[in-house]
Image: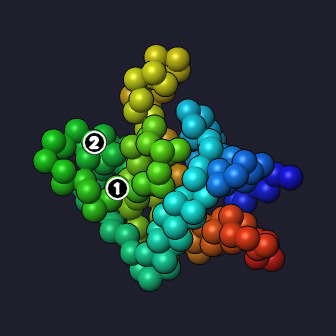
Amino acid sequence: MTIILGDESRFAVEIGERHGGLRRVDLRAAGQWVTCDDDWVYVEQFRHSVQADCAWLDSGGGLPQPFPGLSPVAAHQRLLADDEGLGEPWWFLHWGPTTDNVSAYLFREGGRLTITLAFCRQEHLRLHPEHVGAVFVVEIDVEEFVEILRDTVDVLGEGSTPSAP
C-alpha cells in the first residue's frame, strides 16, 4: 500500500513498501522527484530526522531569507557559492542518504516557508542536464508543511495513520 501526504506540485511524501528496517519513501518538491537517486530510507533514522525538523519548525524555527531583495533562486545560488559555510543556518533536508543528492535551504517569513532545492550529484546532473544550474522553489504555509511532516512521522511509526484532514 502506498500513502501520499501533501501536494506533489509543492511538497509531498509518498510512503511505500517495507523491507526489514528499510522503507521506500519518495519526496517530491516543486514538481520534482527529489529522491530519484535513492528512495529507500532507514526508517528509524529518517523518522527521527523528520521529527526533529517538524519540532524545530513547530517551535518557530527558521530564519528569513538572508539577502533582502534577492529572489529565492538568487539567494540559494549565493549561499551555495559561499565557501565559508555562512549558509549553514539555512541548510535543510538533512534526512539521510536519500536527500544527499540535493542542496536545500529553508527561509521562513512568519507563517510561510520558502524551500529551495538544487540537484548536486554529478552522476544525476550528467543524466539530467536540464537540472544543471536549476533551482526549484517551494512556497508553502508552515502549518501545511508541519502537518505533512507529522503525518510522515506517524505513518513511519508502528501502527500509526495520518491525521484526518
Residue appearing at x 76%, y 73% in the figure:
160
Q: Quadrant of residue 34?
A: top right
Q: Is residue 69 visible?
A: yes
Residue 31, how many percent across, how many down? 63, 41
Q: Is residue 53 left or right of residue 158?
A: left
Q: Is residue 135 left or right of residue 85?
A: right
Q: Is residue 153 left or right of residue 132?
A: right
Category of crowding for the residue at label 2, using alpha-carbon neighbours closer than 10 angstroms: few (below 14), some (14–19), many (at least 20): some
Disc sitting over residue 80 in the figure:
2
Label 2 amino acid?
A: Leu
Q: Is residue 95 above or below residue 48?
A: above
Q: Residues within 10 Å of mark 1 (few under 14, many from 20)?
A: many
Please provide percent x and percent y for residue 43. Answer: 61, 58
What residue does disc 1 label?
A: 91
Q: In the image shown, does 116 or 104 lie closer to the viewer? A: 104
Query: Which residue is depicted at the point 62% across and 44% down?
Result: 40
Q: What number of labels is visible?
A: 2
State the residue at coordinates (53%, 52%): 138
- What amino acid type should be assigned to the residue bearing mark 1? Trp
Q: Is residue 6 left or right of residue 61?
A: right
Name the residue located 56 percent from the left edge and 33 percent from the top edge: 37
Kind of element beneath mark 1: loop
Can you give x and y, in whole percent of width and height, for residue 11 in the image?
Answer: 62, 54
Q: Earlier in the sequence, mark 2 or mark 1?
A: 2
Distance from label 2 to label 1 (Cα)? 10 Å
Query: Residue 88, image x and y in percent?
Result: 26, 56
| Camera-nearest residue between 42 and 38 | 42
